[in-house]
Amino acid sequence: MEAPQRNGTGIVICAGGWRLPMAWANIAILRGLGTWLPVEAWHRPKEMTPAAARLLRAIDAEPRQLKYLDAKGYFNVPYAVVESRFERVLLLDSDITPLHQLDWLVDPRQGLRASALFAPDIGDMRNRNFFKEAFERIGLEAPVCPDDESRCKAVWETDSALVVLDHGR
């Protein structure tokens, strides 16, 4: 798959199927808090009806259908980030309810000064079926650990509840 032409800053959220009500409510809350960054609301084929797409557009969120179809559920998240048109991404899980405007996280003058901000989790990515391919799709080699049994920081999962990523770095 060819990498998209990237430009600007925006929010990426997976909003298909059962995640739609939570995603819609949380985007609406962000709008109420004053966040006017563009939003891409990602879904798999058949996960979003025309009426659902209209609801998202009513709060200035653009429905986007994933091209990579093997991932399901939360495993859509890395593909949404890769397929996003944004250079600087504020990734939100659909079940995260913001209590404050989040624009500052992607403002280079105030927020992210590195290429990414992640929250650690307790899982091991080596157990995920997308592990190697997810790294390869963004032009990186998957991390290697000293042995298959050790707890290795290079392969800790992250809680994708909130991730800030700059594709340009």
Image: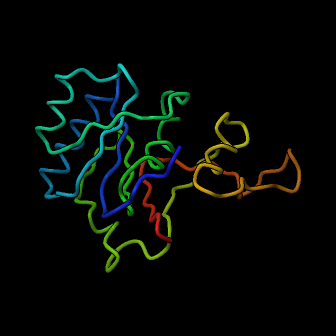
Q: Is residue 103 left or right of residue 1?
A: left
**Nearest to the observer: residue 31 or residue 50:** 50
Horizontal and vertical percent position of residue 149: 86, 45
Q: Is residue 58 left or right of residue 62?
A: left
**Nearest to the observer: residue 94 or residue 142:** 142
Q: Is residue 153 left or right of residue 62?
A: right
Q: Of all residues shown, which one is farthest toward the right?
A: 147
**Which residue sits at x=50%, y=65%?**
116
- Asked if 45 appears above or below 61 in the picture, the reply is above
**Which residue sits at x=39%, y=42%?**
93
**Which residue sits at x=38%, y=59%?**
6
Q: Of all residues shown, which one is farthest toward the front?
A: 2
**Which residue sits at x=29%, y=29%?**
20
Q: Is residue 95 left or right of residue 118?
A: left
Horizontal and vertical percent position of residue 150: 83, 50
- Asked if 76 appears above or below 5 in the picture, the reply is above
**Nearest to the observer: residue 61 or residue 116:** 61
* Location of residue 27 (image quadrant): top left
